[in-house]
Image (cartoon, rainbow, N blue to C red):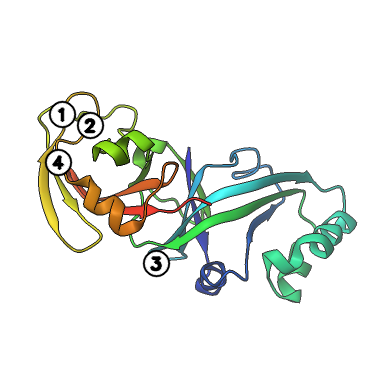
Amino acid sequence: MIHVAILKPAYIDAILAGTKTIESRLTKTAQPPYGSIQAGERLFLKVSGGRIMATALAGEVRFIEAHGPEDIDRVYRQFGKQIGGDKEYWESKRDSRYVTLVGLREVEPINVGPVYKTAYMKAWYVLDEKLSPVSDWVITAGAIRNQYAMLPLTRGSKMRPGTRITLELPDGQSIGTDLASGRRLRWRSWGQVYDAAGARAGDVLRYVALGQNMFAISVKKQR
């Protein structure tokens, strides 16, 4: 699954700056993301009433059932610095029953996100992974040696061999290719992309959908 979290701009700015490392939801009822998110799932961070500004992967996820204000106070003492929020915010949440804490990793700005039907006052959406405009493919030693890449197709994709695809490369170059057998892209000059990024086996080739069969490409280094 993927997730869209609606936040105030200041919180997204703090996440991008690295000062807010946990996204939290404290609610009176067991509603998403409580019980609905797992480590490794992708989040899109959207400004309330505005646009998608960032994406991240869920790190450690904690679900806590609070039995009174003292449990919320305990969450604040242990995680308040990583969560943020002023005194007024935490005071307003002391009667919450359900707490979701999502560690954020691989945070980066982005200006595209999934297309979905919105609902009034809803602050968290759990969506099918096929709606994500972001997909990753793990670069292998063989891919670097033989200068190829695979297109990570989501479940239900209608792409077939011969489908024409446009790639926007990190250097600004735009190239046209097509899907060969399996998921392999027919373009054979991936060495220039890997070399420019210093790619190694285990790094990730990131595809961001810009339109129908059009993707921006980048290499994401893995530690």
Where residue 203 sits in the image (x, y, percent)?
A: 42, 46
Farthest residue toward the right? 70
Q: Amino acid at mark 2?
A: Arg
Q: Which residue is mark 3?
A: 50
* N-term-proximal mark, 1 vs 4: 1
Crowding near the residue tagged with mark 2, few <14, some 14–19, many ≥20 C-alpha atoms within 10 Å: some
Query: Residue drawn 37% across and 37% down?
Result: 141
Of tags 1 and 4, the one toward the viewer is 4
Q: Amino acid at mark 1?
A: Ala
Q: Which residue is mark 4?
A: 187
Crowding near the residue tagged with mark 1, few <14, some 14–19, many ≥20 C-alpha atoms within 10 Å: some
Q: Could one spot residue 114 in this view of the protein?
A: yes
* N-term-proximal mark, 3 vs 1: 3
Where residue 173 sits in the image (x, y, percent)?
A: 15, 60
Q: Which residue is mark 2?
A: 184
Q: Which residue is mark 1?
A: 180
